[in-house]
Amino acid sequence: MGHGGKALGLYRGKPVFVPYTLPGEVITAEIIGGSGGAMFARGLTVQAASADRIAPRCPHFGPGACWGCHWQHIDYAAQLLLKQDVLADQLARLGRLPDHLIESALQPVLPANTIWRYQHSLRLARSPAGWGLPREGGGIEAIGDCHLAHPDLVALLAQLDLAYARARRMTLRRGSDGRLMLIMEVDAEVDPELRTDLPLSVNLLLPSREPINLIGYAHSRYTINEKVFRATAGSAIRANISGIEQLVAAALAALQLSDQQHALDLYAGIGIFSAFMADEAALVTTVESYPPAATDADFNLRDHDNIDLIEGGVAAALAELAEAGAKVDAALVDPPSAGLGADVIAKLAQLPLKRLVYVSGDPASLARDTRQLRERGFQLKRIQPIDLSPQTYFIDCVAAFAR
């Protein structure tokens, strides 16, 4: 299985990527394109099926249709093993880690608490046929149901009749308290007049990512390990709320904080990790660049007097901490899918960190950053994959480094 959800086969010695297939299967496929020495194909018939192949649940799933999830045709136990294999492959090829280190550090994937209807947000794009999800190969598949989304979001989608041309994308959100929200992403600064008789809040996201509250609440509320967090429209939060609790537990175990230590929470978002880190550390410095998320973090962390919140970029904050000679014992990073990059890694290396915990949603960027971190003296100790995205190829991890 290749990273990206498609299985990899060989045709006349050349690699071919085919969606909706599994390792070990023999298939007939049609070549539809190529790039960089690899070819892309669509499956036509399965000549010899894998024992892990199952019937998908969703009528939108399949070749030429929705690519919002990728692995409904794979038994869940096999999905976990495939994710571990893909992660190991990325660490070996992109991270250049030796086999013995991967074998000692990489742990079995922790399964999700639930594998269907677990998403508390659903992001959709407009198509001529209606609102939908991306198709494999391009375009948008209009959907009437999504088996990954919470039932309340599916019911809301069925009731919506949104005839607003400037809204090219929309996100439906459900808070832990059951409150529903519609977030419309618009292509210009506008001030629409809207009416709704549905029990939901409505917000805009301008091209600058500035949120504008139109109806109801400006934020959703989520409960994680008995702590309540607000997330304003535009502020990112993982869609699998119960899975965040697993991430928090793994991150805290890897950080090994004490009440004498100073810790960093970088790319902190609305402050979820900071809230739990502050219960164990003497001081937490929280850094977030997106203003609405930083405002959320300030609100969510208001009951803690041992948190220093910085609204700004991570690289600039690290440079200031290093220049001030800050004594920092541990850091947690939760970067976007592109990863940390060389500049941030270089600045992390300037601090007297003993431990670094890397929360990742992308095995390729984790592998690349791991290679650079090791070159800077950070030794990989453990990677705990956690499945927050059943039926998809996405892989979340908590990686622990020591120096």
Image: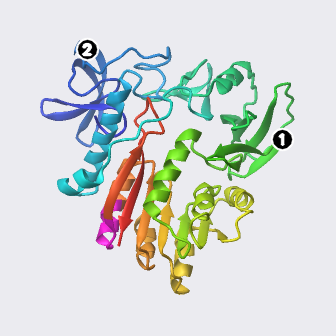
Residue at the image position 73 percent from the left and 37 percent from the top: 177
Apparent side of residue 238 relative to residue 302 in the rendered image (left or right): left
- The dot on residue 46 is 2
- The colour scheme of the drawn protein is rainbow
Residue at the image position 76 percent from the left and 34 percent from the top: 179
Q: Would you say residue 338 is visible in this rendering? A: no
Q: Amino acid at mark 2?
A: Val
**Disc 1 and disc 2: Cα gap in Å?**
51 Å
CB contact under 8 Å: marks 1 and 2: no
Residue 185, horizontal then vertical, whole percent: 68, 40
In reply to whether residue 391 is colored magenta, the answer given is no
On-image quarter of the N terminus: top left
Considering only vertical position in the picture, is 283 above or below 239? below
On-image quarter of the C terminus: bottom left
SS of the residue under disc 1: strand
Please tell me which of labels 1 and 2 falls first in the chain.
Answer: 2
Q: Amino acid at mark 1?
A: Leu
**Crowd class of label 2 (few under 14; some 14 to 19; many from 20; radius 10 Å):** few
Apparent side of residue 1 relative to residue 288 in the rendered image (left or right): left
Apparent side of residue 245 relative to residue 346 in the rendered image (left or right): right
Apparent side of residue 142 relative to residue 369 in the rendered image (left or right): right
- The dot on residue 214 is 1
Residue range highlighted in magenta: 370-379
In reply to whether residue 375 is colored magenta, the answer given is yes
| Magenta residues, dominant SS class | helix
- The dot on residue 310 is none
In the orientation shown, which residue stands out farthest toward the front? 259
